[in-house]
Image (tube, coloured by chain):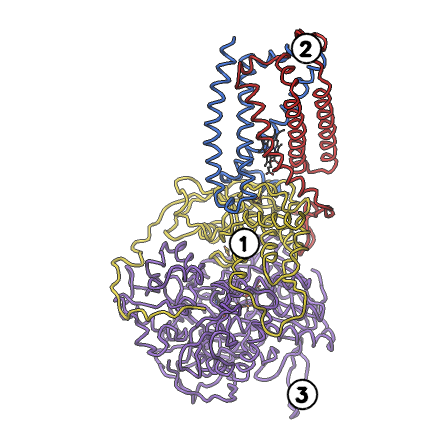
């Protein structure tokens, strides 16, 4: 039964529990606040989106290129979807960031995962925004009457 | 060393399990959102391709998935409101449990309404 | 083995130890050794209050407080010490307030005060509001506040270090009259690190003992499992005397059968005791202050009611604490914790039903003798340079033969502070005393002995026999027969103790081993208590001999001093020598004690 | 100040059977303990003990019975035995409780009662964990009164309402039941944890204290209050009935109010 026993333990802290340097500024607070504010707005945006896409008219069966073109003809829906895209992506990204912080213990793993997350987020937001702004009802394959 | 103490499950109460639900639904929605933006982006490439993708959404299997997703969104949304009330309403921490029951009731009602309409459309049209 | 060097080493991190540490830590390099995390100390269990003649709610002054303390202790109190305590009480409370203690407040915002047993206006005229309190968790708030201030001052703690030996060296010295004697000096302490099983020797210029009480010699007790009288036991083994050990306080209101305390503050807030006839029996025993009579009187009254068949319950073995006539909101705001104890542990709802209570072993009035500067004495008047003691482990003696409620939290603050200052000041002028050869030899042999023991006796069994016999024979009522019975049982247990074995042979957190060591202290102390009680053939304060029911000032108005002495035989016990020490009188002459 | 009460009657009629009692029922239980003896085996394992216990016995009594009558190597911390010292927080039937405050008869004795160490702190032996990281977080929030200005000669005055403001959080006995029940704390042990926040709250809302801002600054950290996900495990676990999550919410709001 020879086991090595660590040195006297008084006030010894397992390195795992040593806190890193203090974070500066109020980023975490703002992120927290943003989660709640964006959450409230997202409820309206997402419920409106789901309702108009899936509940009224023919619901899911009615969705197609024409449906999208019809919607984005109105600046209101353009703005609606743009806001939803941004808020949901930022909200979701921040959420996933917290989750990574929680469960990825190694610093390097954390950095990698968050790197991938941010790249994906930027890509999706930029892509989505471009799609909404540069939407062209007469893209190849369009069978809309105005083309 | 601490593995031995954390290996087993903590039973927790409603609060903990609702948080687990909130977290899981949050991630699910996020992953879906990534895909959803990509597929919607097809409208910028080719209208036919977009329609083709959307038509897969219209199959019964995808409709079921879609229903699940909405279930997740509804829970996440209502529970999100509960969390906001817990944070900002003075009595929020006191009534968190009652609010959770409220969330679940609301969730069942709204989800039932949605599911009936959505599934009848999805299955009806095929 | 490791050796550490500190100016001041404090043994114990309860109220007394941490109050000392706050003073000493700011003046000298100080280490606090404690077998529990500081906030686990039993000071945190204290409920009712800490008294001081602040006169915040009604007229009061420290002289009345002095008088009450002396009378409460049945005149066995050293009056100079009582004066010091009552006078410094006011600053002790204010110090705590300044450190942040959240006392309950009066409508004007001052510290609120409540009544407590034996505290009176103008020498016994009526009960007075003297106890400062924080709901019914005054001790908790004191312990937390002191720990907080230790954190503030960066006090060095060695948590879960059991001190098991005191290192004393002896020198030849001469008294003023030319007679030679052996002067003891303190070199340090030996401790056992629970986490690793290693011994650590702490060399120190000053050592303060603040290791608390010894309630676990009894079965029914309000004291924690860890209050095994280690400090007293260590001092006794190191050849120091123990003073007034026969005086053990039994608190009237322990939850029946469990011993968990319901504060006297409950009676201070208006609760009363009733017997099986529903009678408020204290009207018969103490017509003036009734339920708020000092603890020894109330405890005896209760035991007497039970003995005479007026006890309640199926076995008629307890009486009732009645709070039902009080306003529920009032109870809820002033006594939230104890009502919860009644609910949790007995399933009784105190708002509507009276609570079963019976006296429970509570407080050791005796202990390591010190003077008013907290310096430990090696005999009646020779100070051991560098060795101090404060709190329940010590006997100054401010409590005499019976402590008044709230005077202990006061004691630990007043004398804890004094000890901290004195020990630090001493360490500035003194040098280290050289450690003896192999300082840890005694402890390591003792531990090896237990670890390698192959006997058949089990620690838990011996301990429970000890505790039962002490409850049965050395409790509220004692007489020659019962004390002799206890003595014989203890003698037998001591023999069996040599033949123990334990199951845990490891080095990590070997609590099995330490329980065996603690049992050794308990046996020593139980023996001293019993022998001292046999020796005092009178009744006084907490010590009530049915065969000698009266106080006998002529023969016994003096402190008892028990020494360990291999040669001596007292009351048929070999190894204990009894001596006496005069009581200090300043201004109050003994009177009959009536309330 | 206590109100003056009328003298209670000298004699009353007692209800029959007052004080309860009667035969103390005994019952059999299986205590299933998560053992970990680092000097003997590398891993933790479950061990069952069959015991006969009595009416008012608590889980602590059952543990004592094992230690004293069956297996002396079983190790756990305890001291006061009535819920005021905070030594014996452990996971009983999957949830954090104090062993000395959990009556066996309140548990389902038909099934084994499981007992294991609290989660998230380094396990040292059986039910004993290393508490230092926990106390370290506590120390970091400056848990002591800091007041500027001159010391009054007598006490500082404080109105009863101001005193009441932080009453709840003064009850904390630092048992760690809350922090070790927090799913966020389990993840990496970096989160300050509810207990530290409770003790910060005790000073932030004390009208006599002047360093509230500093404590808010400390807790406005990536490991501070914002990591709380309001799972309420802490509030449910607290043996002192402290509204822990509420205290955390109040601290969050104080930080918000101060920055915005
Ligand atoms: C339930 C209860 C209620 C009470 N209520 C009141 C009240 O209302 N008013 C009042 O005035 N008094 C009250 N008292 C009495 C008072 O609380 C105690 O007498 C007082 O707190 C003792 O303080 P202390 O510092 O001497 O010891 P403790 O607080 O008991 O501390 C002892 C310390 O010594 C350490 N220690 C012990 N042995 C060793 C060792 N071998 N090695 C290292 N460290 C060791 C322990 O770890 C601990 O830190 C009450 C007592 C009890 C039990
Ligand atoms: C419908 C309206 C929504 C509301 C009201 C809402 C509300 C919230 C709130 C309040 C939080 C913070 C929880 C906490 O701090 O404990 C949160 C977290 C989160 N949300 Fe949402 N949300 C909504 C939509 C979304 C969407 C669309 C996504 C995905 C893109 C999403 C993904 C997440 C994620 C991943 C988290 C982190 C979960 C965690 O840390 O446990 N949410 N949500
Ligand atoms: S807040 Fe409650 S659970 Fe947490 S440490 Fe304090 S007493 Fe224990
Ligand atoms: S359990 Fe943890 S997540 Fe918040 S509510 Fe309590 S601190
Ligand atoms: S033993 Fe003190 S809290 Fe349980």
Determine contact: label 1, label 3, CB under 8 Å: no
The disc placed on residue C187 is none
Which label sits on residue D77? 1
Q: Nearer the viewer, residue C13 or A32?
A: A32
Name the spot of residue C581 as percent of width and height, x first.
52, 84
- Palette colour of chain D: yellow
What x and y, as percent, mark residue C153? 68, 64
Pointer 2 residue: B47
User: Which chain is depicted red?
Assistant: A
Tint applied to chain C in the drawing: purple
Give percent across and percent down for residue C163.
Answer: 61, 64
Q: Nearer the viewer, residue D179 or D81?
A: D179
Give the labeled residue for mark 3: C174
Badge 2 element: helix
Q: Quadrant of ligand 4?
A: top right
Element under disc 3: strand
Residue C507, compared with residue B11, is above or below; it is: below
- Between the residue at mark 2 and the residue at mark 1, the CA separation in whole angstroms equals 70 Å
Q: Do the residues labelled 2 and 3 touch (CB within 8 Å)?
A: no
Name the quadrant of the N terminus of chain C: bottom right
Can residue C436 be spotted in the picture?
no
| Distance of label 1 from label 3 (alpha carbons) | 49 Å
Image-based side of D20 in relation to B116, left or right: left
Q: Which chain carries label 2?
A: B
């Amino acid at each position: 039964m020879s086991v090595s026993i660590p040195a006297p333990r008084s006030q010894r802290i397992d390195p795992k529990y040593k806190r890193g340097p203090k974070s500066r500024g109020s980023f975490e607070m703002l992120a927290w606040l943003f989660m709640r504010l964006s959450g409230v707005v997202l409820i309206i945006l997402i419920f409106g989106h789901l309702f108009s896409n899936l509940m009224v008219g023919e619901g899911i069966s009615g969705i197609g290129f024409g449906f999208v073109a019809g919607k984005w003809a109105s600046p209101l829906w353009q703005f609606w979807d743009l806001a939803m895209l941004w808020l949901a992506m930022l909200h979701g990204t921040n959420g996933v960031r917290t989750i990574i912080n929680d469960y990825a213990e190694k610093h390097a793993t954390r950095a990698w995962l968050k790197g991938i997350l941010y790249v994906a987020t930027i890509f999706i937001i930029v892509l989505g925004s471009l799609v909404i702004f540069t939407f062209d009802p007469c893209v190849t394959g369009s069978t809309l009457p105005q083309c | 060393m601490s593995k031995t103490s954390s290996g087993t499950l903590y039973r927790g109460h409603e609060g903990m399990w609702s948080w687990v639900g909130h977290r899981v639904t949050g991630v699910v929605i996020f992953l879906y959102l990534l895909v959803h933006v990509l597929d919607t982006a097809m409208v910028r490439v080719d209208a036919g391709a977009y329609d083709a993708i959307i038509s897969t959404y219209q199959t019964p299997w995808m409709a079921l998935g879609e229903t699940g997703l909405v279930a997740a969104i509804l829970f996440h949304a209502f529970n999100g409101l509960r969390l906001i009330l817990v944070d900002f309403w003075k009595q929020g921490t006191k009534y968190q449990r009652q609010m959770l029951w409220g969330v679940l009731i609301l969730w069942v009602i709204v989800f039932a309404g949605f599911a009936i309409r959505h599934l009848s459309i999805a299955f009806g049209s095929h | 083995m490791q050796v550490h060097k500190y100016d001041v080493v404090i043994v114990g991190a309860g109220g007394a130890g941490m109050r000392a540490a706050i003073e000493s830590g700011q003046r000298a390099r100080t280490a606090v050794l404690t077998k529990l995390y500081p906030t686990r100390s039993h000071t945190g269990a204290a409920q009712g209050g800490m008294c001081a003649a602040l006169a915040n709610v009604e007229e009061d002054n420290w002289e009345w407080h002095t008088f009450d303390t002396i009378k409460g202790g049945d005149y066995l109190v050293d009056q100079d010490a009582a004066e010091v305590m009552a006078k410094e009480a006011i600053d002790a409370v204010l110090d705590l307030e300044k450190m942040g203690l959240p006392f309950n407040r009066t409508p004007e915002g001052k510290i609120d005060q409540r009544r407590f047993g034996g505290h009176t206006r103008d020498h016994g005229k009526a009960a007075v509001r003297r106890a400062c309190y924080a709901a019914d968790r005054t001790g908790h708030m004191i312990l937390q506040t002191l720990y907080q201030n230790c954190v503030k001052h960066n006090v060095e703690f060695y948590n879960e270090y059991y001190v098991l030996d005191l290192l004393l060296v002896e020198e030849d010295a001469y008294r003023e009259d030319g007679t030679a004697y052996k002067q003891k000096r303190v070199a340090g302490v030996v401790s056992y690190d629970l986490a690793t099983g290693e011994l650590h020797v702490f060399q120190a210029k000053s050592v303060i003992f603040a290791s608390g009480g010894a309630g676990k010699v009894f079965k029914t007790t309000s004291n924690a499992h860890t209050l095994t009288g280690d400090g007293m036991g260590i001092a006794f083994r190191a050849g120091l005397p123990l003073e007034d050990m026969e005086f053990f306080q039994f608190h009237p209101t322990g939850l029946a059968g469990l011993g968990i305390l319901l504060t006297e503050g409950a009676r201070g807030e208006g609760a009363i005791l009733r017997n099986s006839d529903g009678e408020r029996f204290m009207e018969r025993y103490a017509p003036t202050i009734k339920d708020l009579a000092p603890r020894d009187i109330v405890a005896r009254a209760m035991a007497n009611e039970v003995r005479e068949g007026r006890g309640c319950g199926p076995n008629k073995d307890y009486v009732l604490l009645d709070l039902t006539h009080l306003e529920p909101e009032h109870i809820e705001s002033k006594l939230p914790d104890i009502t919860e104890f009644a609910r949790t542990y007995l399933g009784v709802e105190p708002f509507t039903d009276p609570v079963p209570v019976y006296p429970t072993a509570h407080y050791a009035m005796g202990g390591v003798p010190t003077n008013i500067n907290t310096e430990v004495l090696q005999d009646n008047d020779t100070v051991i340079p560098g060795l101090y003691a404060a709190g329940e482990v010590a006997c100054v003696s401010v409590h005499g033969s019976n402590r008044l409620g709230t005077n202990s939290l006061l004691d630990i603050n007043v004398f804890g502070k004094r000890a901290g200052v004195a020990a630090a000041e001493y360490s500035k002028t003194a040098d280290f005393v050289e450690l003896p050869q192999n300082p840890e030899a005694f402890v390591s042999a003792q531990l090896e002995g237990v670890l390698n023991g192959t006997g058949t006796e089990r620690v838990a069994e011996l301990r429970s026999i000890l505790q039962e016999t002490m409850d049965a024979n050395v409790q509220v009522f004692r007489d020659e027969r019962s004390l002799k019975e206890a003595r014989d049982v203890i003698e037998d247990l001591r023999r069996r103790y040599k033949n123990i074995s334990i199951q845990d042979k490891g080095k990590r957190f070997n609590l099995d081993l330490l329980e065996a060591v603690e049992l050794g202290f308990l046996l020593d102390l139980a023996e001293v208590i019993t022998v001292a009680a046999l020796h005092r053939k009178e009744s006084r304060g907490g010590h009530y001999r049915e065969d000698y029911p009266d106080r006998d000032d002529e023969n016994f108005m003096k402190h008892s001093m028990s020494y360990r002495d291999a040669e001596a035989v007292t009351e048929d016990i070999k190894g204990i020598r009894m001596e006496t020490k005069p009581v200090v009188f300043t201004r109050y002459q003994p009177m009959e004690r009536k309330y | 100040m206590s109100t003056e009460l009328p003298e209670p009657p000298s004699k009353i009629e007692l209800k029959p059977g007052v004080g309860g009692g009667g035969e103390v029922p005994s019952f059999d239980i299986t205590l299933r303990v998560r053992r970990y003896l680092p000097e003997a085996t590398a891993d933790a394992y479950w061990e069952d003990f069959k015991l006969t216990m009595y009416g008012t016995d608590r889980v602590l009594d059952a543990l004592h019975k094992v230690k004293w009558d069956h297996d002396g190597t079983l190790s756990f911390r305890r001291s006061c035995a009535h819920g005021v010292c905070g030594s014996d927080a452990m996971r009983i039937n999957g949830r954090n409780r104090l062993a000395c405050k959990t009556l066996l008869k309140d548990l389902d004795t038909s099934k084994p009662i499981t007992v294991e160490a609290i989660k998230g702190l380094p396990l040292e032996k059986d039910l004993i964990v290393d508490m230092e990281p926990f106390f370290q977080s506590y120390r970091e929030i400056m848990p002591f009164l800091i007041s500027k200005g001159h010391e009054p000669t007598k006490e500082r005055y404080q109105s009863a309402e101001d005193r009441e403001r932080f009453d709840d959080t003064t009850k904390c006995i630092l048992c760690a039941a809350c922090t070790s029940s927090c799913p966020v704390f389990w993840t990496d042990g970096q989160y300050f944890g509810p207990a530290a926040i409770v003790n910060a709250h005790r000073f932030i809302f004390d009208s006599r204290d002047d360093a509230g801002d500093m404590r808010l600054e400390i807790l406005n950290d990536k490991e501070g209050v914002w990591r709380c996900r309001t799972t309420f495990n802490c509030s449910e676990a607290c043996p002192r009935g402290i509204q822990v999550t509420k205290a955390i919410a109040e601290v969050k709001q104080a930080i918000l109010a101060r920055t915005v």
